[in-house]
Structure formats: C-alpha cells, structure tokens
Amino acid sequence: MTALDSELAREQAYLDEARAQLARMRELAESLDASKASDAVSGEVLGWVLARRIASLQDDPRTTLFFGRIDVEPAEGPAEQFHIGRRHVSDEAGDPVVVDWRAPISTAFYRASPTEPLDVVRRRRFGVDRGRLTALEDEHLREPDAADGAAGSILAAEIERPRTGPMRDIVSTIQPEQDEIVRSDVTVSVCVQGAPGTGKTAVGLHRAAWLLYSFRDRLDRSGVLVVGPNRAFLDHIGAVLPSLGEVRVGHATIETLLDHGRVRAVEPADVATLKGDARLAAVLRRAVWSSLVRPTEALVVPRGVRKRRVPAYEVAGIVDELAARGVRYAAARDLLPQRLAHHVLLEMERAGDAPDDRVQDAVAKSAAVKKYVASIWPALDPQAVLHRLWSDSYALREAAGDDLTADEQAKLLWDKPARTKGAARWSLADMALLDELDDLLRRVPSLGHVVLDEAQDLSPMQLRAVGRRASTGSVTVLGDIAQGTTPWATASWEEAMRHLGKEEHDLVVLDRGFRVPAVVIEYAARLLPVMAPGLGAPVSVRDNPGRLELRPVGADSLAAEVVVAAQRAAASPGSVGVIVPDRDVERLSAALAAAGVEHGRLDLEHGDDEDHQVEVVPASVAKGLEFDRTVVVEPAAIAAAEPDARTGLRRLYVVLTRAVSELTIVHAEPLPDALA
Ligand SMILES: Nc1ncnc2c1ncn2[C@@H]1O[C@H](COP(=O)(O)OP(=O)(O)OP(=O)(O)O)[C@@H](O)[C@H]1O
C-alpha cells in the first residue's frame, strides 16, 4: 500500500464516520415529537420545521459528504482541519465533522493561494465516484513551488466528466475569482461580464444558495428569484439549487415574469426595439397621470336635509397634494375618498355639527363621493391605458410630449386598432410596458434578491421590470455583450445597470474559460473583432486542447454527413448536441431517426432531460446550454437567419461555444468570411 493509498483509506474511514454522524442527527430529528407542542398551531409549525429538517438530513449515497479539506495553522491558536461539504455535520458533542461550503470558515478553502494563504497550509481536494473517494490532490500553500491559480486535475476531471441531463453544481471546485462573486454581501449588486463558459450561470446559482444560507431569515421572507432566457434554459439549470439543498428559489423567464396577458403578436424588430426604449417609461407615466381631471365643480354630499360642499379649488388642493406625494396612482386614488370626507367633516363642524369618525367613513363610502372621485381621478387598468395609446393618435401625442418624434409615434400606433382591450393582440414588448403601467398604478413588491442571467438580451424596459422586483433588494446580473442576439441587446453594462435601478454596483469580468477547450474557443473568437470589438476571448483553463473538425460536404449529402457526425459523437459516453439552423430541425431530426439515431428535440419550451444522449437543438435555443460534443450544421445559414449581419455572427458565436470537448462543423455552404 502506498502512502497515498493509506491516506485515502484514512479519509474514507472519516467519511464513513461522517455518514454515521449524519444518520445519528437524522434519527434524533425523527425522534422529536411535534404533537408535544403547547397548542395545535405551534404543533403544526413545529411538525413542518421538523419535516424539513429531516428531509435536509437525508444522505445521498451517490455523493460524498465532503469534497475538500483544509489544514489551518493560525499564528495563534491550535492547528485545525476542516472537511468541507454540501452540508454541515456535527458529532455528539456538537463539534463539526463536516462544515457547510457556505460557512465563513470555508472561504479559505476557495480563496487561499500561495500569495495569500489565509493560514491554510494544505488544501486537499477529493476525487469522487459514486459516493466513494477515489483520489486526492494536495496543494501545500507554504511551499515555494506551489503554483497560483493552476487548474488541478480534479478540476479538469470535474469539467470533463461525461454529462447527461441538466447542469451540475460546482461547489467542490469553485475558483477564487468566482468565490468572490458568490460571497458578495447581500446588499451588493454585482454585474458579471464573462465570455462563454466562464461560469457565470454557475456563479449566479451558487450566489443564490450562499445568500440563502447566510441571510436566511431576511431572504426567506422576501424571496430569491432566478430569471433566465427560456424554459429550455431553466430546465437545464433547474437541478443545481435543489442539489445544493435550496428548493425555495423561484425560477422564471421574462415571459412568465411579465405575464400580463396572452402574447399574440410578433412585431417588426424596429417597433419592438422602440417599445423597449427607456423613453417609454416617461410616456407611460404621463399617460397615467394625465388622466386626472381638474375639478371644476364642488363636491356636494347630501347629509339628511342639508347638503355639504367642498369647493372645487379645495378639492384641487387635495388632489395636488396626493399627486405630489410619490404614491402610486391607484394607491393615491384609494386615499382620496377619506380625504374628501375629512373636508366634508370640517365643513360640518364649521356649521356647528359634532360628527365623529363613523360619519367620515359613511361619507367616504357614499355614492356621491364615489361618483365624484370617479369623475376627477378615473380608475385605470394597464391594458386599457396601453390600448388607448396604441389606438388613439391624439392620446399618444399627449403622452409622448417631447420624448417621441412624430415618426416614432406613427410606428407605435396599431394599423388596425383592436376594438376593445380584450381583443388587443399584445406583443412581448407590450408585456414590459403593461408591467411598467402596473407599477405606476400600484407598486410591484420587491424580492430580496434577483439573479438575472443572459441579461444582455433584455431591452431597457424589460430591465426596468426586473429591477423593480429588486427595488429594495439586490441583483446578480450575468451576461456577455458578445452574445447579445436581440435587436435591443445592451451595449453597455453601466447603462443596463442604470435601467435596473442599480447604478451602484460591482462590475466583475470573468475571463478564465472552463467549458470550452482552447482550439474551439480560438476558432469561435475569430468572430469577436467583427461583432463585438473590444471584447476578448476567454483563456481556456483546460490542459486538454479539445478537438475541432471542419467537414465541408456536398449539399446532397449534408443530412447523411450530419448523421455520421452525430453517430461518431455519440459513440462515447456524454451528451451530444446537434445544433442546426431553426428551419432544418424537422428535416435533420427525420434523417437521424431514419438512421436509427435516437434523440430528443429541444425547443424554447423544453429543455434537456436524461432520456436522450443526443439532442437536436435549434440554433435559437442553444444559448446557455452545453454538451460534451457538439455537431454544428451550416454556420452560414445559422448566421443568415438573423435580422442583421452582426446579430447573425453573435448567434453563431453562441452556437460554436457550447462544446466541452469536441466541435464538429458540417457545412455545404461556404463558411462566413469572419470564420475563414
Ligand atoms: N469552478 C468550476 N469548476 C468546475 N466546473 C466549472 C467551474 N466554473 C464553471 N464550470 C463549468 O463550466 C461550464 C460553463 O459554466 P456556465 O454555464 O456557468 O458558464 P457561462 O459563463 O454561463 O456560459 P455561457 O455564457 O456560455 O452561458 C459549466 O459546465 C460549469 O459547470
């Protein structure tokens, strides 16, 4: 037995002991009896807490309880060892056997470096296979030859481990620059610009888990939300937080978040871009507040045989005061009846009556006051306001002020106005405007934290909509300007963060590439100078350079060659993505089926599952996904499907950067010049 073997055996024994301690903790929790609580309600709450605790103490035999260890030798105090894992385990005495990766002590595991050892003398990482320790890798941080920032073989093995199904967590190998983002304080909004595969999504999800652990009470109440581009993407990432023990995080797409009606219209890019412009916020604000009608007649309230009056100028004063208070339109309207009733009361007192609060209530609820309020402060709903703006050129001109040119107004008006708001054919861009209106009427409640992925694709109005859901909380914004594929994609993070209402933020650039191997990233990076000048390619951290193969073929044999490439890619374990121009999905899927290549088909609504090794992926759905090996079909057609050349090349860049190990390009048309 080598020294390494015996060390591994010792660690395995420690793991067995940790498992026994976890079982003990679980048995203890199971033995507690919720029915002993003092009353039924506390019993129910206690029962619920216990059930959650027992569930959290389940041992998953497929993983280990720890993936790393640090040996710490502080200048003062005793030397100690800590095993780091996905959850905390303690012994009978309450001493830690395994510490949670999110606990403050674990920071050193992720951040210690030879230049800043943080009292760590040794960092150990474990290789794991089906719940057993199979390898260990030690870094001695005080030794002069310890390299800074090197990607060890366990990191490489972790990345290259064949994948099927959804994305995995990266707790065992979070890198120092990633850890700094993960552990940013709950009050700090962070914006991460990172090239493909630099771990943005992984970092955002781990940040959510860390925040929930570190600020549990606060965030349990206010909530944490992850926003991603589409359902397929959410399916891809959906297992990460549950695997970290966090099931309380909501996941949404922009469509599900801004669900103010059915999207039934697709509009030209220039109209959608204009509707997404931040100037629309001022237009909508004006449309809402200009609904107020200057009172010209007194409020008259019959009380018995008398009539009480509040003169118009006095009502105007009340209205002005409410409108100036910064309260939302509908919320201020709710206050108006009591304000008016109060003035009626004052008038009664002046006349010698002695009315009490009940009289004020009765007046506020009277038909006369209701009718009067409706005449000067009309009730609004978002759909009615937007329906009017898009149908009525006069209303739009009034609301537009100096913010929109006549041409722009003409562009926004419907050619054939819907007769009623119910019949309106709303577009996706309208949803963000309806959300803005909703918030102008009544404040949309804020969550504690929002993680926004692929943020570069959102319009200013969509960013505002996400931002208002974090108005009193913070955000983690993840994206890559070079992967912006919407006509309204953001060109600057400063600007995007301003639309989100987070001018104060930390901007971090991630540039070490984990997913994409060197030959593939270098090839894809040829597109950068053309479609995102100024942005650099990531530097691949992987020793394995990967494999890139170009297969020019005749147009007649394209489908057959795609089948061959897919079969070859599927010959070894791991996921395969056949990424094709959207128009070719049917045809190529049929060719694969005819050749007996079993596969799934992704679309915006359906993500990868564990049922299929091979997935056919429309180019428009590939963003954010990854596969061990990809076959990319007809790059020129993928680029040509977009409305302009720049967006086409950006789409292609996204598609070319989905591979973890191998990229095969099959094409009959010449490749775009930028790739040649
Ligand atoms: N520290 C790490 N250890 C192990 N794997 C990592 C690490 N960081 C990132 N990865 C892996 O690299 C891959 C890419 O990560 P991720 O999807 O988060 O990148 P991204 O920056 O969001 O990419 P894209 O912009 O292409 O969507 C994932 O498989 C992720 O698990």
Image: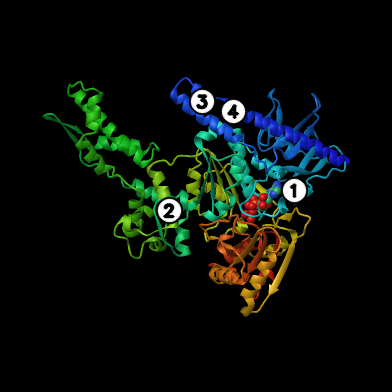
Give the image quarter of residue 39: top left
Residue 431 numbered mark, or none: 2
Give the mark nearer the N terminus: 3 vs 4: 4
**Distance (Cα) linking label 4 and label 1:** 36 Å
Can you tell which of label 4 and label 2 is closer to the viewer? 4
Labelled pair 4, 1 in contact (Cβ < 8 Å): no
Residue type, numbered disc 2: Met
* Circle 3 Cα neighbour tier, 10 Å, few/some/many (<14 / 14–19 / ≥20): some
Residue 621 visible in image: yes
Q: Please report the residue visible at 79 percent of the width from the left and 55 percent of the height from the top.
A: 543
Answer yes or no: disc 2 within 8 Å of ligand 1.
Answer: no
Assign a secondary structure to mark 2: helix
Task: Give SS at disc 1.
Answer: helix
Instruction: Return the residue at label 3.
Output: 34
Residue 554 placement, left or right of 139: left
Amino acid marked by disc 3:
Ala
Q: Where's residue 560, x and y in %?
A: 63, 75
Residue on which the image places disc 1:
155
